[in-house]
Amino acid sequence: MGPQRPDVTDEDLGMRAFQLRKARATERAVDRIRHSISTDWATLTNEEIEQLEWVLGELWAYAARADWDDLHFGHLAMHDIRRILVFGRELRAHSRNAVDVLDDIAQLIRDKGPSAPRA
């Protein structure tokens, strides 16, 4: 018998690798956001932070890697985070098409990028 475990399939390993990559990408995005909004971060509840992490994870799973890499989370302000949380509620409630909601979130973040005009 070889070194492979018979109870772990390639599919299981692939799903776990996907979840780990998603968690790392989400953690990096949240760190950039936390740094960007600095003292305002403390105004977010644990539930809101968990919701933000979930939304960013959904966005990571949806977006092409090149598109994700072009999102500049460090340019977001607190009002942008609040808008993302509203989008997250729409996503969880299935009140709009999930693709439309995720596209709106990505566009909001792209609009705040370094080449975007400052509001």
Image (spheres, rainbow, N blue to C red):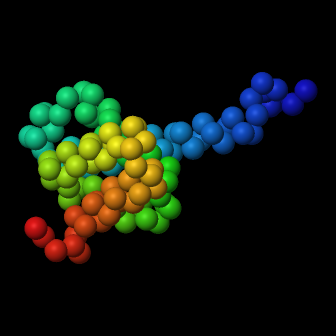
Q: Quadrant of the C terminus?
A: bottom left
- Name above or below for residue 26 compared with residue 65: above
- Name above or below for residue 70 compared with residue 2: below
Pick whichever, 43 or 98, lies toward us. Answer: 98
Residue 16 pos. (x, y %): 60, 36
Residue 118 pos. (x, y %): 12, 70
Residue 4 pos. (x, y %): 80, 31
Q: Residue furthest right?
A: 1
Residue at (63, 39) in percent of width and height: 15
Residue 79 pos. (x, y %): 14, 50
Residue at (74, 29) in percent of width and height: 8
User: Does the rendering let one see residue 72?
Assistant: no
User: Does the rendering let one see residue 90?
Assistant: yes
Query: Is residue 69 rendered to the left or right of residue 12?
Result: left
Pick whichever, 41 or 93, lies toward us. Answer: 93
The image quadrant that residue 88 belongs to is top left
The image quadrant that residue 42 belongs to is top left
The image quadrant that residue 6 belongs to is top right
Residue at (67, 37) in percent of width and height: 13
Q: Quadrant of the N terminus?
A: top right
Residue at (45, 50) in percent of width and height: 98
Query: Is residue 83 rendered to the left or right of residue 63?
Result: left
